[in-house]
Amino acid sequence: MTTEQFGVGGRTAIVTGASQGIGETIAQRFADDGADVVVCSREQEKVDAVAEGINDGGDGRAHAVECDVTDREAVEALVEATVEEFGGVDCLVNNAGASFMAGFADISENGWKTIVDINLHGTYHCSQVAGEVMRENGGGTIVNFASVAGTRGSPYMSHYGAAKAGVVNLTATLANEWAGDDVRVNCIAPGFVATPGVESQMGVSAGELSREDVERRIGLSEEIADIAQFLASPASSYIVGETITAAGVPELMESPDV
């Protein structure tokens, strides 16, 4: 059986929020498969280390760029650097995000705007700028990141959930608008994933989890990277405008309240 359709080798991908966790794992995965990757975050030193690790052993090359996705000029510079370094943009992974837990009544206007700006407005900036390059050069793929907080709601995460719900809607809308330009747009909505942030909050590390265990509600960054690679590859050519939820065993009501 051939697996070539799942490959991303020979392509150029931008991965935002790639200094650690899911973004770093996706960048490493793409490079291991032969893609050239541009890794970015707000801290140059952190993405420099990610790029160095990829360049020490990956089949693809990596280039690190400092970028705040809420800053339009910084995003434009990111895309320009990608084109200059690798000749184009074939895939964009909008992974950059942030949040904090608070009750809705306690979220300040600044706190609300900050979270919406990073998660939704940042996706807008990156998609619009990188998408223009794709549309002018034969197409590409965009993989957005939402969350189950954006598809189901989540207490104490109203700002984050609202922003991610916007990403889900933007995904479907943009997929429709840009299909004629051969740009496929899809989205991943993870549940809990054993990233450094989740480990610090919940005390569960990736080393304690096994992909063979079905009965769990915390996943691995590698499992999300599998989905991202699939959505960026020709194997998902008939999937357009969809949001794939990766959240483990669903929570169901044992008995209805009547």
Image (tube, helix red, strand yellow):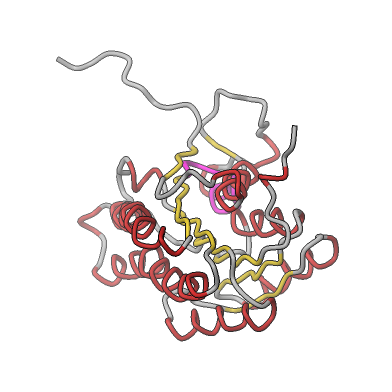
Residue reaching furthest to the right:
56
User: Residue at position x 39%, y 56% from top?
Assistant: 175
Which quadrant holds residue 204? top right
Residue 71's spot in the image, x, y percent? 43, 81
Residue 93's spot in the image, x, y percent? 54, 61
Which quadrant holds residue 46? bottom right
Q: In the displayed structure, does residue 154 sit left or right of residue 41?
A: left
Which quadrant holds residue 42? bottom right
User: Residue at position x 55%, y 53% from top?
Assistant: 197
Residue 85's spot in the image, x, y percent? 69, 80
The quarter of the rendered structure image containing the C terminus is top left
- Which residues, given as a range, are shown in magenta? 190-200
- For the image, the number of numbered tags is 0
Q: In the displayed structure, does residue 44 sit left or right of residue 2?
A: left
**Does the magenta run of residues contain 176?**
no
Residue reaching furthest to the left:
258
Q: In the displayed structure, does residue 82 sit left or right of residue 249?
A: right
The quarter of the rendered structure image containing the N terminus is top right
Of the pair 136 and 122, the residue shown nearer to us: 136
- Vertical placement of 1 versus 180: above or below? above
Residue 9's spot in the image, x, y percent? 72, 57
User: Residue at position x 45%, y 39% from top?
Assistant: 245
- Vertical placement of 155 versus 94: above or below? above
- Vertical placement of 38 versus 58: above or below? below
Q: In the displayed structure, does residue 39 sit left or right of residue 71?
A: right
